[in-house]
Image (cartoon, rainbow, N blue to C red):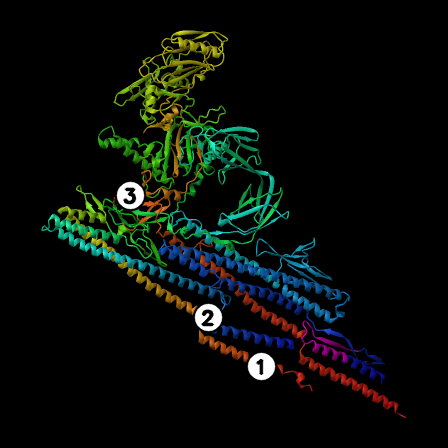
Amino acid sequence: MKISTTYLYDRAVNQMTTSQSNLAKSQAQLSSGKNILRPSDAPEDAVSIQRLKSVIARQESFEQAIQTTENRLKTEETALEGVSNLLTRLKELAIQASNDTNGPKDREIIAIEMQGLQEDLLSFANTRDANGAYLFSGSRVFTPAFAQQPDGEVIYQGDETVNLVDVGDQRQLRANRTGTQVFDRVVRTNPNGTQFGVSFFQSVNDLVAAVRSSDRENMNRGIAELTNLSDSVSLSIARVGSDMNVVSGQRAVLEETKLQLQTVLSAAEDLDYTEAVTKMQKQILALEASQASFAQISRLSLFEYIR
Amino acid sequence: MADLVSIAGSAVAAYQRALGTVANNIANVDSAGYSRQEAGLIENAPRSYGTSYLGTGVNVTGIKRLYDAFIENSLRNANTELGTQDSLVNYANRVVDIMGNEEVGLLSAFDQFFDSARQLATDSSSIILRSQFISKAEALASRFQGLNTQLNLVAQETAEALKSETDSLNSLSEQLALVNAQLGKTKLIERQPPAIMDQRDEILRQMAALAKIQVQERSNGQVTVSIGASSSRGEIVSGDVFRPVTAVMSESSVGKVDLVINAASPRAEAVFGFSGGSISGLMNFRSQLLEPSFIGLDNLAKTLAIEANAIHREGIDLEGRNGLDLFRIDPQFSMVSNSGDTNVRYSASVLDIATYSSNKLRLDYRANAGQINNVVLMGQFKVGEQITVNLNGAEKRLTISGALTTGPDAGTNLVDGALIDLDEVQAQLRTFLEGGNGSSVGGVFGLQINVEDGTGTDLLVTSDLLGAFNLKVTSGSEGGRIDEIMTRGQWTLTDTVTGATTSGTKSVALNGLQIDLSGEARDGEILFLNIANSPSAGLRVAVDDPSRVAAAARFRVIENQFNPSKVSASLFETPEDFSADRGLWLDSMVGDAPDFDRLDNNILESEAVRFSGPKATPIAIVPAGYKDTTLYLGDIGSQPLNLQIMTRDGRHLLGQFFEPSAERIQAERDRLGREDLTDVEMAALFDEAGEEAMRLYRLAGVSFPAGASYSHQYLNVAGDDAYRGMDLFYGVRADVQEIPQLTLDHVYGAIERTPASVTSKAIGEITASIGDVIYGEGDLSLNGVALGQLKMVDDGAGGPKLQLTRTNDVGDTVTLDLPLPGTSMNAFGAATNGRYALDATHLKAYFDAHSYNRVLGVPTSYGRGGPLEEFSKTFGVTVTVNDYLDEMGDAQQSLTFARQMENYGEQQAIDFSTAVNANGSITVGGVSIPLVAGETANQVAAKVAAALRDSPAFGAQSGRSIAVSDSRVVITYRVDEENASPVTATLTTSTTPAVSISTIRDAFVDIPRNPDPRDSQIRIGLGQTGSAAQLAAIGFRTGAYLVGEVKEDLLVFAQGESGASFRLGATFKEGSRDAVESLRNEPFEVSFTGKSSYSIRDVLTNTIVAERSYDPAAGIVYRGVTLRLNTDPVAGDRFLVDGNQDGIGNNGTALRLGELQNQRVVGNKSYTLSEAYGNLVGDVGNAAFQAGISKKALEVVKDQAVQARDKVSGVSLDQEAADLIRFQQAYQASAKVMQTSSVLFDAILGIR
């Protein structure tokens, strides 16, 4: 079959251009370390790489949320431990006061200290976080959780909102505990047998009043209730603790997930250097071969021999 | 010898040519389109010598161009195919690289936006996080804009490429036309110069790369070239004529490009079925890849805005306000007027993102089609001043009233001359223009005009009916001024793509877009609005103040701190969907059910909807938000039929107790061992019957919530204990009418109060036997007091009489006989089978004779004064007794008419009709007054009045006045005669046949001492056992009156025996109520009454709106929110759900915004936003990839075609070298022959 001279030259040039551009691409891959230089090289892969990156970014944002939650839990834990200690001291005082060796004056003195402790309790209940938001006010974060009325009654000013925070694709955590959850009510029984709830601070107030007035029956009731109150605070501390466990567990899960995703991402996105270098060697060889052979072939012309 | 020379000569010449051809081939080895040439050699014709032939040499037949039409054609095709893919691949890769780029593409921007929402949820009160959220939203919006810009650049580039490619095509066509002209000079293709033929083929090849061409070759090598599907059309070159092709880009759609031939000439021709070549590749790229990318991007932008806005609007911002739109779309316009410059200014905003499209719009202005009058109030008006309104020549005046209806002081009444706010004047003027009935038909002029509040204290008046009208509003005030600005003309807006139109005077809305127009337009002016940007380019963040980011949820649940259990509750919004009920709404009861006609503000009984048979499903629904609704039950005859109105939660509000069956009552009696059941015991039975009714309704498909139970606690209860404070009543009700005075008589009395009045309609015939009870004791009540029994009894003389019985408050049974004075058995008609027909005449006589209250059965034993006084004290009402004497047209019989009159406040009028024509007499208090033929009614009245005045028992009483007015005798009694003894006067008329007393009407009891209008209502209601039929028996139509706004959907049932038929009429004002928004202001409390039962209490009105059993799986669903408990509740647990007015630390909405990332919201809810974008990139990428593969395949095809052509037409230097040597040797050999012949010749010459 006849091959025209133009065709011969054109084809040789085409082949060399192709080899050269392949080589250039390989070189660019090697220098960037990426498998895919432009999305158009492998659109599907490029999209899935971006999806992976998006999932990783989401894990990172969960980690950030976990950090915020953990800070908050720590603040809550500190406040609750303070409350727990105060309650222990209150109980000591109450038991001391209930001792028959005490006269009304002694009890008055004890009552004054207990009153002070009650106020400390209140200040713990109104703890704020780093942003100045009250920890135990539910969603009324700019309103103190508990306020003492002129008549001594302590009322809860927050609400019952428990905010949830996303800490994983399928995992939510409580971000806060409300005042009424932490400072739980006690249940008293009416003479007629029906039950009713009494607030945390009312119970303490009643106890202080009982000590002050040497009301033995109410003192005993108050001591029994203090045990309940301590228990409920301890329970809250335990809950905070378990939430913190959940937090650290979730953090580990997220890190693990992220690592896996990054492995997958690396496999999709990063260049296999061994393979790439080998490929480039081949391409160089091919280019050199086509250049050399062209040089040879171009000399082959009948005119060379017509003298 | 000579022949030898000539043979050699011919050969030398021939080979010289052949060598020339070879030389030419070598010279053109690199010329584009050159076809190898060969010199054709042929033996010369031999000469005959005797029997043999001698050759005469060689001859060149011509220079042959090596050419294969078939190969040439396939090469052209290969060029076309490759051209198609080439441009597609180039641009598709551009788009993929733009959209798939991490920095430009949307994926990372989506991530960051949703991430910022999640971070906001960790501390939603933080201003820093809020600002970050806004800036990430802005980044996302600008990413959309950036992408749109990039794609627009590609669109522009491809548009330019299309233009340049068509230009190339046109220039090639022009060259080809010139070539054709050259070829035209020769008739035979063989004679055509090869260079020109090569040029022709080269041009055709180039054209083929641009577009798929059809080539027809004529015998002389001229070609006709056409593009498009059919070769008979779309000719671009024919002979020496070429026709230029233009690519016309559509303004409305990127993907739409039309090729037009000879676009500039009147015979422009559109190309159909065009395909192939780089032009087609560009067109394919635009329609198959670029346009879908634009659409996909716009769709994403719209979806993002719609979804994020929907969530954000359901949130609450830092200051407790409702969330606004988070994103908006700003359209950008360019406007062109048909008349060059224009004075019209416009502004546009996107109202509804979902329907927004960027289609080109056309605005037509017609000066006389519509009008808007802006009435501006200024200055200071005073109470009592007037405003004159002239509409098309008719004039009406408004006197400014002091009764305030707007503002904080609404309800107070200012004295004349007091200063009054412009807002109040504006409201009064608006009410006046509308005729006090909203924008419905009528108005003071009897014409429908639409009035809207303008921007300040101004009113915008338009009329759909009149279009243009003449309105003049003038102030009659000293200090108040009124200006009017009239704007004429109407704009019609048309979508040039879909053809949809809309019109308006100053603003028009279409495609989710509102366009406000101002400035002077010319009649007939047309404006074209091009929307320069698509939704993705116009996407903006609408919130710029961090505190306006609505991060909090709209609702919250507050556990009561004294709850006995430790259960905690969480709340979700789960919007209710009652759209299936839409067809039952009062305004749209059309269609479906065969019995249903239209029930639309229709109070005329004859036109009301007819139903046949009671329905176990609602016969109508009064939707929440409707105002002042009344449903009338008509045409029921004596059927025991009632309307039953219930809430969706089984609260029975209006109607009649569901009747327990006789067996059930008996069973209860047997169980208790006694006949009389207490009210409590009966109530339990009624509840049981109600539960049974609900069960039946449920079976018939009424969707009461799961676990809902029946309650009649609010049945027919009015006042403070009424259901959710609504003013509801079932029975007959009339209110005091308060009508603002608009008279011209300079009496500035603000409001005239017309006493409440009810008028029974003409009573049909009641057929009753002796012993029949028309209504029983307690069946009916008047303003809450139970009425006695009305019964047909034997009058002792063998005739019937009516008897009222009532047990009074001390337990005595009081009986009141209602004899028919002066009537005989005949008046009742003959007894048929022991039943008497009581017709209207007689019942009316009762009404008249015994006063209304007696007929109804109000006892007389209520202390001081007579029954009417007691009546007025007890009920505080005004009753109008309609007198039916006018129906006694047949005056053959004499009638004695008696009326008991006592000293309570009363005014009574006796009406005389036209002139009395015959002799007769009227007896007044025993004195007979003779009547003379020919007397006028007025004269008769005067006589009667005089006789009454003269009557010692009647006229001489102080405090009474008797007057004659318009042929009426008006008798007025004072109210303060506490101790005056009762007086009896009897008015007897006796007429001859020609004399008639036509009517006695408008006798009414007026008790002005009770100023509270609420107490002046008339309410005739039903007791526990009454029914609408009993009210119908005494001429009243029973209705359900829902005064004010209906706070929730009410289901209206018809209850009665099957086969019953009746009509239902209704009046109402349409309105709507946003369930969720209203719930925000109406907190409710869920109280557990047991472990598995709870009630829901409306906190504001302390109404129990639902009592249900508790299903832990379903939670507690009420009015679009669902409450879930984490563990089992116990009795006494209470949960308050409120509108979260101050819960700024709540993060509910921020969480939802974050979760939007994983929600499938795009493409029929199958993809998340990110996935949809990924798909978009993937689709373009795949197309590019496919095109790339086919491009490679086509390159091979083209390669082969080129090779095939080269095989025939290509120049190979080796071949030429060989030819060169071959021809050189032949040439040299021939030359040798010549030399030889010359030697031979010389040899011969040399013979001596």
Chain of the residue under the numbered disc 2 shown in the image: A
- In this picture, is B56 found above or below B252? below
The answer to whether residue B38 is magenta is yes
Residue B414 coordinates in the image, percent (x, y): 42, 30
Residue B185 quadrant: bottom right
Q: Are marks 2 and 1 on the same chain?
A: yes
Report helix, strand or loop for mark 3. Answer: strand
Report helix, strand or loop for mark 2. Answer: loop
Mark 2 or 1, closer to the camera: 2
- In this picture, is B717 found above or below B1199? above
- Judged left or right of residue B510, residue B189 is right
Asked whether residue B1168 is in view, the answer is: no
The answer to whether residue B291 is magenta is no
Q: Amino acid at mark 2?
A: Lys
Residue A232 coordinates in the image, percent (x, y): 22, 53
Q: Residues within 10 Å of mark 3 (few under 14, many from 20)?
A: many
Q: Are marks 3 and 2 on the same chain?
A: no
Asked whether residue A264 is in view, the answer is: yes
Chain of the residue under the numbered disc 3 shown in the image: B
Circle 3 sits on which residue?
B1087
Tell whether label 1 touches label 2 (CB within 8 Å).
Answer: no
Quarter of the image containing the C terminus of chain A?
bottom right
Circle 1 sits on which residue?
A293
- Give the CA distance from mark 3 to mark 2: 63 Å
Tell whether label 1 touches label 3 (CB within 8 Å).
Answer: no
Circle 2 sits on which residue?
A34
Residue A192 coordinates in the image, percent (x, y): 17, 41
Q: Amino acid at mark 3?
A: Ser
Chain of the residue under the numbered disc 1 shown in the image: A
- Range of magenta residues: B16-43
